[in-house]
Image (spheres, grey):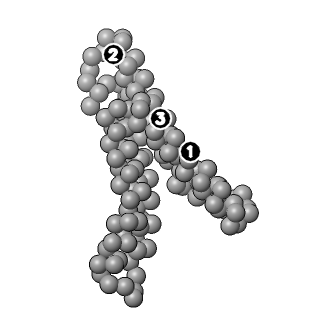
Amino acid sequence: MNKLTKITHWTPRILCMLAILLISVFALDAFGPGQTVWHQLLAFIIHMIPSFILIILLIVAWKWEKIGGIILSIVGLAMGLFLIRTNYMHHGNFWNVFYPVMALAFPFILSGVLFIISHYLKEKNLAEGNNIPAE
């Protein structure tokens, strides 16, 4: 596996894991004073549902790069549009909208595109006769 193929193989996986970790941090707001431990734990699990879905999408993208990359890109675009709409209604300022989109949605768009690129680079290597396993 050449260097470019290695980079496009591991970068989207690591980027997507870091983005899921960032989104998972927001679930920690379920813990606070004034509620029972079980209520806080249930709220935490409910807040983690988006992260669980994104983990499933990462597993799909890990197994089937092209399909997973397309799905991650669509999810990132949908998340970006949702964040733009929601934040612009609350703030009305471009920069207050731009930063959350870049931090939360763009990593999924980028990792989706990189998964697709990785798929095509591996196909190209196989077509050229480089039968080296991808991993």
Of the image marks 1 and 3, the number of the one nearer the N terminus = 3
Q: Secondary structure at mark 2?
A: helix
Q: To which residue does mark 2 refer?
A: 126
Q: Residue at x 52, y 54 (%)?
A: 104
Task: Mark 1 and mark 3 in contact? Answer it, CB < 8 Å.
Answer: no
Amino acid type for the residue under numbered disc 3 = Ile
Which residue is at the far bottom?
Answer: 34
Q: Is residue 21 above or below residue 8?
A: below
Name the residue beneath numbered marker 3.
70
**Residue displayed at 26% across by 31% down:** 135
* Residue 11 in view (yes/no): no
Residue 115, x across and y down, in percent: 42, 34
**Quarter residue 125 falls in:** top left
N-terminal-most mark, 3 or 2:
3
Give residue 32's position: percent from left, percent from top.
40, 82
Along the line of sight, which residue is nearer the eye, 103 or 86?
Answer: 86
Q: Quadrant of residue 89?
A: bottom right
